[in-house]
Amino acid sequence: MNSLISPPALGLMFILSIGLAVVAQAAPDRLQRPSPLSASASRAALTAIQTLPDRQVMVGDSGHILLLGADGRVEQARVPVDLLLTAVHFVDGQMGWAVGHDGVILHSADGGNSWKKQFDGNQINVLLNDWAGHEVEHLVQEAAAHPQDQALSLALENARFAVDDAKAASAGGASRPLLDVWFRDASHGWVVGSYGMLLSTADGGHAWQYRSDLDNPDRLHLNTVLGLADGTLLVAGEGGRIYRSVDNGEHWQAPLTLGPASFYKLLALNNGHVLAMGFGGALFASRDAGATWQVLATPVKAALYGGRQLADGSVLLAGQGGVVLYSDDGEHFRLWRSPSRLPLLGIGQISAAQVALIGSAGLKIQSLAQLKEQLQ
């Protein structure tokens, strides 16, 4: 199995906690080299999973994208890149996107059977250079017209820093990890990533725009993005920040800080509630589309990385140390722990009787009845 490739600066990234080796490789090779086909791919690290009507789609290490069918067979899709993939999202049974390291964005139009690269970190570098240059030009003119405006002076200083940062990043190649992706429909989507990265598309990913709308001057990492049915868009990440837009990302409210613990995943429930989970067992619930949040108690302090609401309405959350939290109502949780104690990063529902657990050791099929019997 190829080792994970992870920039050392991304201490927030939950994938660093799965305990695999880190090696240095040339980014262009990873973007141009297809993911290796391997009979052991289901035992390699898997980072995200989505349940489709007839299959589970899983992404992970070395560009692996695996399809678990209703018959239990696991097939490996052909993928054009060989790097860590961190998230996947389908809007229906056919149209889906996956993102990962080196700023890669992949697209599938056939339920995950085949994938094409839409975008990567080299193109993100171009976007950032263009944006930073235009921002400096605009602010220079504004500052000249209002020389006593301290806020403009500070904004100009930050913009000049952004120019230097964009140039330095470009010199380093495609090194901008993307951490999550969410699409409202087959056209409109968002991706988030390291150092405050937020991109949007209105044409299914053919073109992407860099968004500087969030109040995030320290460029804290953005780990997760989620849209709600009413047009609300939520982004969460480092430093316990929650960012909220009520108009599909056109305008953003001042961020809420719910505590010091970074958030790794947002999960929408069928009753309209939203869960935000993260480091140290941090778990919050919102009953008003992200406007306000309440703390939920958890039986462990393990980091929580992903989850799923099952067809019967119950909720499973996955985390560090093989932790799975189970709830009948989405508010009160009991503990089950995988015997391996290895990190779990996501959960998919195979049937009424089985779930798919994915993490640092790959794929595990787990009986729901057995899990419930062993709850603490």
Image: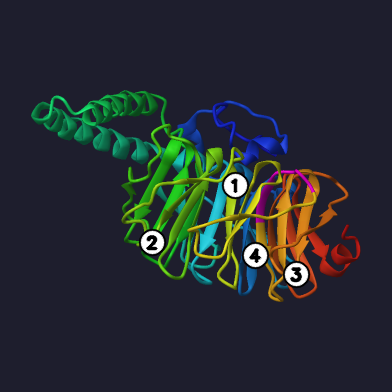
Eye-nearest disc, 2 or 1? 2
Which span is picked out in magenta?
Answer: 300-306
Residue 43 location, x and y as percent?
A: 75, 48
Is any atom of residue 65 visible in this view?
Answer: no
The numbered mark at residue 328 is 3
CA separation, marks 2 and 3? Answer: 29 Å
Q: Secondary structure at mark 3?
A: loop
Classify mark 1: helix, strand or loop.
Answer: strand
What residue did someone put label 4 on? 56
Which residue has dot 1 on it? 264
**CA separation in Å, label 2 and label 4:** 31 Å
Relative depth, front residue between 274 and 91:
274
Query: Is residue 162 visible in the rendered structure shown here?
Result: yes
The residue located at (59%, 72%) in the rendering is 270
Say few, some or many: other residues with alpha carbon within 10 Å of mark 3 (under 14 / 14 to 19 / 20 or more). Answer: some
- Distance, label 4 to label 3, CA atoms, is 23 Å
Residue 126 lies, with reference to residue 317, above or below; the image says above
- x, y percentage for residue 90? 51, 64
Contact (CB < 8 A) between labels 4 and 1? no
Judged left or right of residue 42, residue 337 is right
User: What secondary structure is marked by label 4?
Assistant: strand
Image-quadrant location for residue 123: top left
User: Label 4 to label 1, Cα distance in Å?
Assistant: 21 Å
